[in-house]
Structures are given as structure tokens and as C-alpha cells.
């Protein structure tokens, strides 16, 4: 079994055992879609494509926020309890450690995002009587675009949490999550189709997500073990 698989598997098990994070994620995954579904149903005017666009527009920020919730527990937890020092003594590169942890927390974050998307679609369908589950671009959005952004958000925030102290992380964490959400909203409004769903919008979002993931990997590669040790409280 590879080092990456071991680290990712460990993070997934810890995430699924953390009831407080799971409950927080579940409440957010259900509450926000239900509240948003009424606006989506009212603004779409019975058009299935417009309904799918509304669901896609709300699902991506949810995925980013889920990445933040699970990522914060994975990276900051080990700084608070001191176990990060043990991991730093193992013959594993920091980039490999970051890759495994980011992938491990991205899996439960993505699954929780799918729950949110299912709740949104079900609520919208119940309000309008129109099924949107089979919309091809919406399925593409959920299967490709959302996981890329979830991994990118978890990876970028995780890299920052490794490099910065606890106080700086409290400030930067909120700044990054809101930055991600504003970026998503801006891209959705800038490309043709506005806040709706289109092939062009999906291509732009995919490219932006991959660019953010590459940036996160670059930052993680610049972090040193000495830097992490100096930020442990």
C-alpha cells in the first residue's frame, strides 16, 4: 500500500468518526439548499435548464465550504494536539503528506456536497414538479467540477494552515473561504449564460479549479518542516 493511500485513508477514517464536524456539515448541507430552493424555483420560471443552473450555482460554494470544514479539523487539529511533530519525523515528504491529507478530507467533503445537491434537487422538484436529476450538464458539474473545487479548497487552505500560526489561520481561513465563494460567483456571472449552467461556464470553472489546485500544490511544496515547527503552539 502506498504512502499516499495510508495517509488519505487515515484522514478519511478520522473525518467519518468526528461527529461534531459531520453534524455541522450535515446541517449546513440541508439548511442552505432548502432555503435556496425557494429562490431557485421562483426565479427559473419552470425551465428545467434554469433550475439545473440554479442548483449548480449553489452546490459549488457548498462544496468549497465543506472542504474548509473538514480541512480545518485535519490540519489544525494536529497542530493543536502536537501530533504533527510525530508525522514530521517520518520519512515522508511534506508534499506527499499534504497530498494525502487533502485527498483524505476531500472525500467526506465531496460526499456531503452530494447530499446537499440531492436535497436541493429534491426540494426544487417538489416545488416545481420538474425533475432536473437527468440534466447532462448538471451531472457533469457534480461529477467533475465540484470535486476539483473541493480538493482545491481543501488543499489551498490546508497548505496555508501548515505554514501559518494558529492566530493567522483564524483570520486567513475566513478570508480564503469567502475569497473562494466570491470567485465562484464572479466566474458564474462573467461567462456566457450568467448564473445559469452552460458548457462554456463549466469549462471556465474547471480551468479555474485546476489552476487553484496547482497553486495549492506549489504553496505546499514551499513549506518546510522548520516552518511548521515554529508555528506549533
Image (cartoon, rainbow, N blue to C red):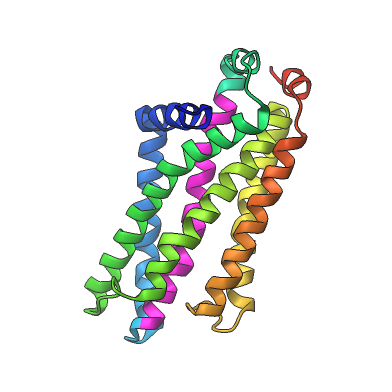
What secondary structure do most residues of the magenta stretch adopt?
A: helix
Q: Residue at x 59, y 84 (%)?
A: 192
Q: Nearer the viewer, residue 208 or 32?
A: 208
Q: Residue at x 60, y 76 (%)?
A: 189
Q: How many marks?
A: 0
Q: Residue at x 41, y 27 (%)?
A: 14
Q: Residue at x 52, y 31 (%)?
A: 4
x, y (%) of residue 127?
25, 74
Q: Is residue 118 left or right of residue 182?
A: left
Magenta span: 49-77
Residue situated furthest front in the rendering: 1
Q: Is residue 100 left or right of residue 38?
A: right
x, y (%) of residue 171?
69, 39
x, y (%) of residue 183?
64, 63
**Figure quadrant of residue 25:** top left
Looking at the picture, does residue 18 appear above or below residue 117? above
Question: Which quarter of the image is occupied by the C terminus?
Answer: top right
Q: Is residue 53 magenta?
A: yes
**Figure quadrant of residue 84:** top right
Q: Nearer the viewer, residue 35 or 224?
A: 224
x, y (%) of residue 20?
39, 31
**Figure quadrant of residue 33:** bottom left
Q: Is residue 67 left or right of residue 232?
A: left
Looking at the picture, does residue 5 appear above or below residue 194? above
Question: Which quarter of the image is occupied by the N terminus?
Answer: top left
Amino acid at each position: 500500500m502506498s504512502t499516499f493511500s495510508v495517509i488519505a485513508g487515515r484522514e478519511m477514517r478520522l473525518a467519518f468518526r468526528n461527529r461534531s464536524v459531520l453534524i455541522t456539515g450535515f446541517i449546513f448541507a440541508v439548511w442552505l439548499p432548502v432555503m435556496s430552493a425557494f429562490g431557485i424555483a421562483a426565479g427559473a420560471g419552470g425551465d428545467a435548464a434554469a433550475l439545473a443552473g440554479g442548483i449548480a450555482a449553489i452546490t459549488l460554494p457548498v462544496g468549497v465550504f465543506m472542504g474548509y470544514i473538514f480541512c480545518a479539523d485535519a490540519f489544525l487539529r494536529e497542530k493543536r494536539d502536537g501530533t504533527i511533530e510525530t508525522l514530521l519525523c517520518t520519512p515522508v515528504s511534506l508534499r506527499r503528506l499534504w497530498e494525502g491529507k487533502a485527498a483524505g478530507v476531500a472525500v467526506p467533503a465531496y460526499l456531503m456536497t452530494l447530499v446537499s445537491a440531492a436535497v436541493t434537487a429534491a426540494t426544487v422538484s417538489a416545488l416545481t414538479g420538474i425533475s432536473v436529476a437527468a440534466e447532462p450538464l448538471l451531472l457533469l458539474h457534480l461529477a467533475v467540477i465540484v470535486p476539483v473545487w473541493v480538493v482545491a479548497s481543501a488543499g489551498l487552505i490546508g497548505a496555508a494552515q501548515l505554514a501559518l500560526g494558529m492566530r493567522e489561520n483564524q483570520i486567513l481561513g475566513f478570508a480564503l473561504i469567502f475569497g473562494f465563494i466570491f470567485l465562484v460567483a464572479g466566474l458564474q456571472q462573467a461567462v456566457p449564460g450568467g448564473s445559469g449552467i452552460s458548457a462554456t461556464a463549466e469549462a471556465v470553472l474547471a480551468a479555474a479549479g485546476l489552476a487553484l489546485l496547482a497553486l495549492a500544490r506549489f504553496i505546499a511544496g514551499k513549506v518546510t518542516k522548520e516552518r511548521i515547527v515554529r508555528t506549533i503552539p
